[in-house]
Image (cartoon, rainbow, N blue to C red):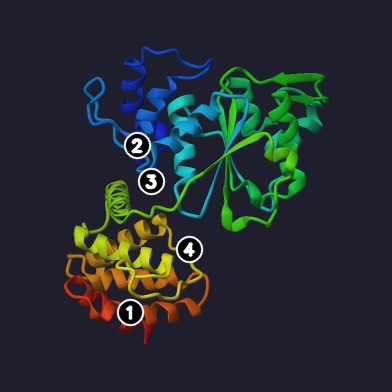
Amino acid sequence: MDAVRLSAESKFEKEIQALIAGDKGEKPPGWAMTPRAAQTYLMGSDKPVGGVKITPKYIGDASIIQVAIATLASDRALMLTGEPGTAKSWISEHLSAAISGTSAYVIQGTAGTSEEHIKYGWNYAMLLAEGPSHKSLVASPILRGMKEGKFARFEEITRTSSEIQDALISILSEKQIAIPELGEMIHAKRGFNIIATANTRDRGVNEMSAALKRRFNFVNIPIVDDLEQEIQIVLKRESELRSDYSVGAQPPEELGKVLVTVFQELRKGITKDGKMKIKSPNSVLSTAEAISVLFNGGILAQSFGSGKVTGAEIARALVGAVAKESQEDLKVLKEYCETVVKTRTGPWKEFYKAATEKLN
């Protein structure tokens, strides 16, 4: 298939099928695999399963994934919270793909999200011609998930107005949706649940009501603090993007380490040796942003450079990422380069030269 991006259930179909085939434990009703197999799919396995290597989709604390999976087997819906770029949507997609067999039932929360997106709407041409009927009904992703016993995903729920969010209360409490126009009540099949995500930076935008919060179990996805772990994540995901898009030069591992070090130091406001405090920018310097910068650097090197990724390409890609929130953040980056980067050796020298040229 010549698709830009395959869904998780398509891209990792062999891994999912291998886990299902070798899964002999007791599954929760409506689930394609056991909770333990779902954890193996998310966290990866050292040993092949049925001759298939299970790659890690999430590199981090296994207990986070365990709590998320256990929640989905309970009467509570799952709320994944955290800073932007901490893999909330990634985890949501892969949990749905592994356990439900599809990650397609998704609502993207925006200021324009309406109750129709949560419950159901109508094909108004057919409604006028034939009146209310099953043919003219347009089921929301949540309604489809209820009918089929699948997970539905609600991305960035706090971007949606509070009144619309509260339409979920009866769905999560009663596990049913009334369609009075058809005189019907749709009851959720076993296996149905909702995975929602919310950015902590959106807190206060459209704060969830206490009643709705009680219907969710909250699981926080933390920013990766461990340097080596974040380097591993960034290099792995950059390699996957390069393969998916068939573009970009492969960056050396040492440049991945430079980039992640920059991100961690600017995020924490202190150098890795703990000797110097530095200013932090307002921009979100997430792991996802680091992956994007490294991938972009590879494309710059392949398209406009020598074909070899250097600190210069990384610096050029980084400046654009830092400037997203405010031009003042570029002053923070410049100060960081002059006080911290300037004294470092190896690939840091190319990075410093390109960054200062771009910032001056």
- Residue picked out by circle 4: 284
Label 3 environment density (alpha carbons within 10 Å; few <14, some 14–19, many ≥20): few
Residue under the point 61% across and 56% down: 202
- Tell me the kind of residue under disc 4: Val
* Distance CA(mark 1)–CA(mark 4): 18 Å
Q: Nearer the viewer, mark 2 or mark 4?
A: 4
Give the image location of residue 126, x and y in percent: 74, 31
Contact, CB < 8 Å: mark 1 with mark 2?
Answer: no
261 lies left or right of 173: left
Residue toward you, 312 or 336:
336
Q: What whole-number distance in Å separates the C-alpha atoms at marks 1 and 2?
A: 44 Å
Amino acid at pointer 3: Val
Residue at 45%, 40% (x, y): give it. 91
Q: Give the residue number, with chain letter if any, for mark 3.
A: 4
Under circle 4, the secondary element is loop
Reading the image, the residue beneath label 1 is 337
Q: CA distance from mark 3 to mark 2?
A: 9 Å
Residue 30's x, y, as percent?
53, 17
Q: Between residues 226 and 349, which one lies in front from this camera angle?
A: 226
Disc 2 marks which residue? 1
Question: Which of pointers 1 and 2 lies earlier in the amino acid sequence?
Answer: 2
